[in-house]
Amino acid sequence: MFQGENIKVLPLTGGFVELRFDRRDESINKLDRRTMAEFREATACIAAEPLVRGVLVTSAKDVFIVGADIKEFGELFAMPERELASYTLASNRAFCAFEDLGIPTVVAINGFALGGGLEMALSGALRVMASSAKVGLPEVNLGLIPGFGGTVRLSRVAGLKTAADWIAGGKPASASSALEAGVAHEVCEPALLREAALVLLRRAACGEVDWRAEQQRKRNAVSIQESALADALAAIEDRAIQADRRHLPAALMAVNLLRDALALKREAALQLESEVFARVAKTQAAGSLVQAFLNEQHLKKQYRSLGQKSRKLEQAAVLGAGAMGGGIAYTSALSGIPVLLKDIRKEALDAGIREAERLLARQVKAGRLKAESAQTTLAAISPQLDFAGFREVDLVVEAVVESVEVKKRVLSEIESELRDNTVIASNTSSLLIDDIATGLSRPENFVGMHFFNPVPAMALVEIVRGVHTSEEAIATVVNYAVAMGKSPVVVKDCPGFLVNRILTQYVRAFLLLLEEGADFLQIDRAMEAFGWPMGPASLQDVIGMDVSSHVVDVISAGYSSRMPQMPHNALRLMVSLGRHGQKCGLGFYAYERDAGGKLAKSVAPDTHALLSKLQRTGDRTFSDSEIVERMMLPLIVEAAVALEEGVVASAAELDTALLLGIGFPSSLGGPLNYADWLGMAEVVRQCDWYAGLGEAYIPTQAMRGMARDGARYYPRVSKAEIRSAMKASQPHRVKDSSITR
């Protein structure tokens, strides 16, 4: 009846047809431009056939439809806002045409139906879900709102509160939750899905199910009292307001849209949705979050490529049962890779196992893990005081004390206990891999593996390539990190590697501001208002002043021209006074446990007086914008230098590392994406304004060249590319008018 590249319409018995999503040469279905064009044509073909009694919608993939093709967003979002709104509304008409077919339609949801996938399903009259399937509208996670009618249809199908919760929260819902919300009409076992959907379709066609009423309520306006409206949205709106304050406006825009569109009929509501979608798509947050998603996909593609070169991973080992080593062992076991946990002290091993038990108990309590699975995970950690079984391990992670001499001694001892092809990874945050590797007989098997603390919670792992490190060793460690659910980024061996090196410039900018008389409270407020989860003073308290001071000194020594010594800085002062931050109850701030055991922060009364001893000229007034510029510019410049030096291979990897590693504001998308948003000419102009503050503020020659040429780290999409893409989206189809009655 219809055959395109991604959609087929196939005749079934009894006068029914099947509209099947089956994206050519792909494992999943997406609603890209071509698929949408085919969907319009397929719907028109069905509408033109008077003998068709009903439509079954299916997917030939393991998922239903995962949403739009995000790779197309760059071209779409380059359109002017009004043009983007018109384009979105025109796309919506395809769903309206399907919704307005004069016959019943049943959508069989076999797997994930996310974003546009759920919006397509909502345009059908009835929905049957496999018990394993999930549905949701996660667009807010990309800084967007649904654009294919999700705000209009979901609020009328499931009610305002559910719609607001699903859309502003962005989390997928289970089949049982969808059934309870009225989004699914039936739920069945996956093997029974097709037959259950066909039975429902036949019942609808025979008039046993009022499918017309299901469709009509999506066209109508909804009448609701103002008090009920406020009650439905109160808690969700509060969360959305908090996100908006972090420069993530999508959730609040979605809540306001839901409120405004409820009283409108379908066409007017869709018009409003298209306008708000275009508006939010043009925000900095949307551009940043979409780019961050594309960067993550770039990394996943690299992981798949490296995975082909990896050695087989069946057994791991960890040396050192401290906080880091214990966390690594727990995460390894949780991911299904058994691990030997060795330490020289039984007390350390006992503490490591107790911590694993605590973390597993929390998982069980939260419902994320079954009790028997927790026991299996715990059994996969083998605590030991000797090297028994180390001949069988494929990879060893060393996590002993942060000392070159200690690490060299431990690694030299362990190397003789391993097979010749076992990979050794050192978990170090500040020591050079090549320094640790001296003395190893097989340095090609040695690599850095910098986990961030706490290991179970932090996604980033820096994989550090030494001079002698083989590609196979890199691939093996990357594969291990991915298996643990981490996001590894491969970096070159240098002081601070990538993330801590760039963070050091940010911390040094903070210390310099304090020396010049800035108020640490204002700095924290300004940077938090800018989007950071916490200000730099709070961050030092969390890290620990002693740890941060040591790391800043070590890394700065490696880049003496851009990071000259700061002998009398606030970190050293705090350390000299024993004010190490949260862990001792006093740093820049004071900390006490409340009645519930939660750590409460307050302003320490003497901090300003202490910091005044460092100030060169007493207190000085700074504007918030000046504070932001002075904090962010050294970070941007150091990121640019690191990329130019080949510390990391791409802007995508660098920005991902900073987003995952230090809580860089997600609304900015990473330092290089933020530089693109400012424009390199503006970055250079600001740098030149602050050039007197030191080399940290001096842009590279490459940056000046980018400013001159209007270049970017992430190239813009041209108008010609947009026109070409639109032309390429035209469907290629084959029509066949045969209907089996």
Image (tube, rainbow, N blue to C red):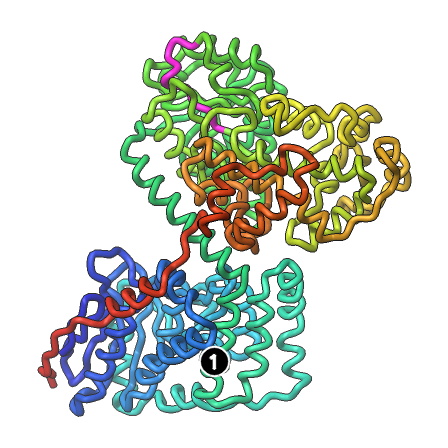
Looking at the figure, which quarter contains the N terminus? bottom left
- Residue 443 covered by magenta stretch: yes
| Foreground of the two, 114 or 360 | 114
Q: Residue at x 50, y 34 (%)?
A: 642
Residue 534 appears left or right of 259: right
Give the position of the C terminus as an image quadrant: bottom left
The answer to whether 122 is drawn above or below residue 714 in the figure is below
Q: Which residues are magenta?
A: 440-449
Q: Residues within 10 Å of mark 1 (few under 14, many from 20)?
A: many
The verdict on residue 403 being magenta is no
Front residue of this view, candidates 447 and 709: 709
Residue type at mark 1 is Val
Q: Residue furthest front?
A: 708
- Residue 66 appears in view: no
Q: Hey, which quadrant is residue 489 in on the image? A: top left
Picture quadrant of residue 246: bottom right
Residue 372 position in % (x across, y down): 47, 42
> How many numbered marks are there?
1
Q: Position of residue 718 (x, y in %)?
A: 36, 61
In the image, 515: left or right of 633? Answer: right
Camera sees residue 736 = yes
Identify the residue at horizontal 27%, vertical 35% (top origin).
308
Estimate the x, y position of residue 259 in percent, counting from the top left.
Answer: 59, 80
Label 1 sits on a secondary structure element that is helix
Seen from the viewer's position, the closer of residues 379 and 262 is 262
Compare residues 681 and 433 and report the one nearer the observer: 681
Q: Position of residue 393 (x, y in %)?
A: 38, 21
Find disc 1 in the rendering and name its residue. 152
Q: Is residue 519 above or below residue 150?
A: above
- Above or below 69: residue 608: above
